Image: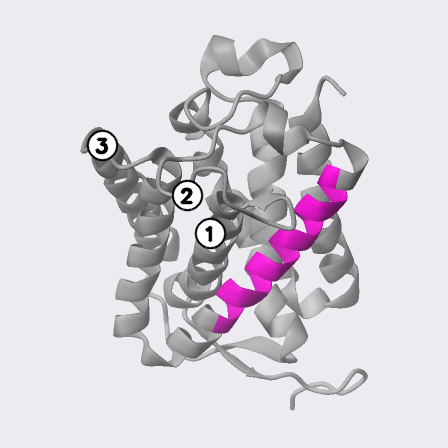
Amino acid sequence: MSHEFLLLSLLFLLPGAVIWLARPDLRPVMKRMALASLPFAATERLFYPRYWAPKFLFDLADRIGFGIEDVLFVVGLSGFSSTVYAVVFRRAPVPCAAPGARPWRRAGAAIALVIAVAGALLAAGVPVLYASVAAMAGGAAVLGALRGDLLVPGLLGALLSAALYLGLCLVFAALVPSVFERTWRPSALLPGRALLGVPLDEILYGLGAGFAATVFPAWAFGFRYAKALPVGRRAG
């Protein structure tokens, strides 16, 4: 298959689509995270071709530094990584404090800082994937220190996201045999190491994304994770 990344991106949209249909109460979080994830699509220029070298639609990665696949991928990843904790543990977002007059301004500042830290680590010689994971996890850890109630959800969200990330990659590998060997160039810290054929680098990325995506929206938009009401019941 010549467009492996497109297939992977479409696969990553599926869990979020299921959650969107099954949990309407999580749709506001998913919308916000889809929008917040878009700047990360442009970070493809940090990964390509250092970390991997897939073929992009219309060769956009060579032309502008990222492709349509990146947009689909980050939206799909944000969709399930920001909600899988709430789904599995039957939690719902409940306002707990006013996020401030401009929550998107603080959200944007946090996103810009994470990207800047990742870029600085890359410039210092840290392999690109580990720079990205360190920036995401480090940023989420700081937010968790500010909001202690988010640490446990963040850690559980990280584990669940990594498990789902691994499952999607296994489906991807079954559909496109030997794709990881052909297209990926694993970073120096974990060369050639894999779990069930999936590079450990990728699973580590799923962990970092899950931690950040569980903590970040709750901090930015002022909600906590509370026990969800049974289906059919409404608050008040």
User: Which colour assignment does the render follow?
Assistant: one colour
* Separation (CA) of disc 3 from disc 2: 15 Å
In the displayed orientation, state which residue is furthest to the bottom. Answer: 236
- Precedes in sequence: disc 3 or disc 2: 3
Q: Nearer the viewer, residue 120 or 127?
A: 127
Q: Report the residue marked by disc 2.
A: 190
Gap between marks 3 and 1, in whole Å? 19 Å
Q: Residues within 10 Å of mark 1 (few under 14, many from 20)?
A: some
Dividing the picture into quadrants, the one containing residue 199 is top right
**Dot 3: few (<14), some (14–19), or many (≥20) neighbours within 10 Å?**
few
For marks 2 and 1 on the same chain, the one whose residue lies earlier in the sequence: 2
**In the image, which is nearer the foreground, mark 3 or mark 2?**
2
Residue at position x 65%, y 91% from top? 236
Residue 23 magenta-highlighted = no
Residue at 46% x, 34% y is 186
Query: What's under tag 3, amino acid-wise?
Result: Gly
Q: How many residues crowd mark 2 within 10 Å: few (<14), some (14–19), many (20+)? A: few
Dot 2 falls on a residue whose secondary structure is loop
Magenta-tinted stretch = 156-173
Q: List the residue tagged with mark 1.
A: 204
